[in-house]
Amino acid sequence: MTKKRKPLRVFRILILVILIAVVVYFNQVVIPTMPTPFVPTPTATRAPESYISEAEGLFNDGKLLQAISVYEEAIRYNPNDANIYLALARVQVFAGQIDEALRNAENSLLLSSNNSTAYAVRGWALTRLGDYATAETAIKKAIEIDPNNGLAHAYYAELLGNMYLDNVGPFEAIDIAIEESRVATSLSPNTIEANYARGFILEITDNREEAVQAYLAAININPNIPEIHIALGRTYRVLGAIGNAIDEYTLANTLNPSDPIPDLYTSRAYAAYGEFAKAVQSAELAVSNDPQDPYLIGNLGLMLYRNFEWPEAIEQLRLAINGGTNADGLVIEPLELTGDDLYITQYYSAFALVLANTNHCNEVINVSKTILEKVPSDEDAVFNANEAMRICADSLLTPTNSPTP
């Protein structure tokens, strides 16, 4: 009585083995590569050095705002690198973001308290803010740490040049500035700042042909910094090379269209050419970039006056000199006549004359009186003030067909 064995089902066993192998493979190979549910998929991170390289390339291309954005992104990935803050601050000065530049130079110092260049850039930013005393302390500290820091000497030359122009600081400021600019170009001949500082000092000491060469040297290092083209254009204009000046202002405007300064200077260059219609157009562009600046509004009024657009000139000069509200409802602060700025004096003179020549004599006395009291040593301004009052006095004695207000 023996039990018969059931025959082995080889096919079933083979299928079972295969299924077991599939499960093992899926468990050990496939599942580890699958993303965990509800957990974000990791993304590849950029190397911090790539941000630096990209920002430097943007700066060299004149894309200052984009360079600033990339440097800020680099700081988010590496907030403890003092050199990134320092590089960012330098670009921000060139871009006119002075408060931000000062803050980032100080951030760099927090991370590297004995960094000569960080002190130097801090002083450079303070110079641009007009805080000369604090700027000098910072730059001297930079030179004390590293006497061979060419950038520090360049910033010191620029500081002393500004002090000389503003009649502050030591009596021998310009002599020290000349020497510092030479030291800067000797130590750092291939930097923008050293050549720019040298050009600036040569310009303000009336060595303008040499200033042109220094500015061109800075442009050869980086042709896309608007400030340097403005400085070169300014120098060309004084030398009488008006066409070259306009070319440089146009380049600066192309690099930074939101800056009103190239348009302001272009308007004055066209006026020097006697092309007052073009001067008006450039002056209008300057105002459109900064519609609340009374200095720009006064310049537009002056160009309108010279182009014999007198009603429009009166409107703009009155707004610049008396203050008020423009057509868009923006409040304009009045310009004060101090005699420190030749163009403001010209705005007042033009206002007095255009008022007199259009029979607005009720306003002439106050404007002329201000000129006579504030700038009595300016012979041209005094003559114009007296001439405006003479025209009004004659109009009271002799009936005319002049237009009435």
Image (cartoon, helix red, strand yellow):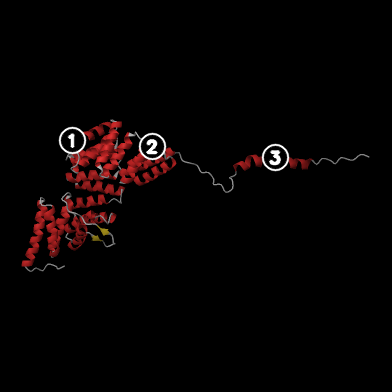
Q: If you read the primary sequence from the N terminus, does the residue marked by circle 2 or circle 1 appear first?
A: 2
153 vs 166: above or below: above
Q: Nearer the viewer, residue 107 or 128?
A: 107
Task: Decide: is 13 above or below 401.
Answer: above
Residue 15's disc number: none
**Disc 2 + disc 1, Cβ < 8 Å:** no
Quarter in which the N terminus is drawn: top right
Query: Which residue is tagged 1?
Result: 175
Q: Earlier in the sequence, mark 3 or mark 1?
A: 3
Q: Residue 246's spot in the image, x, y percent? A: 23, 48
Instruction: Kindly report the distance in space between the C-alpha atoms of the residues bearing marks 3 and 1.
Output: 89 Å
Q: Residue most toward the right?
A: 1
Closer to the observer: label 3 or label 1? Answer: 1
Q: Residue at x 21, y 41 (%)?
A: 163
- Could you classify mark 3 by the number of other residues whose Cα lies within 10 Å: few (under 14), some (14-19), or many (20 or more)? few
Residue positioned 31% across, 47% down in the render: 255
| Label 2 residue SS | helix
Image depth: mark 3 or mark 2 in front: 2
Element carrying mark 1: helix
Please name the residue that numbered disc 2 is placed on: 111
Rendered image: mark on residue 21? 3
**Amino acid type assigned to the residue bearing label 1 in the image:** Asp
45 or 303: which is nearer to us? 45
Q: CA distance from mark 3 to mark 2?
A: 58 Å
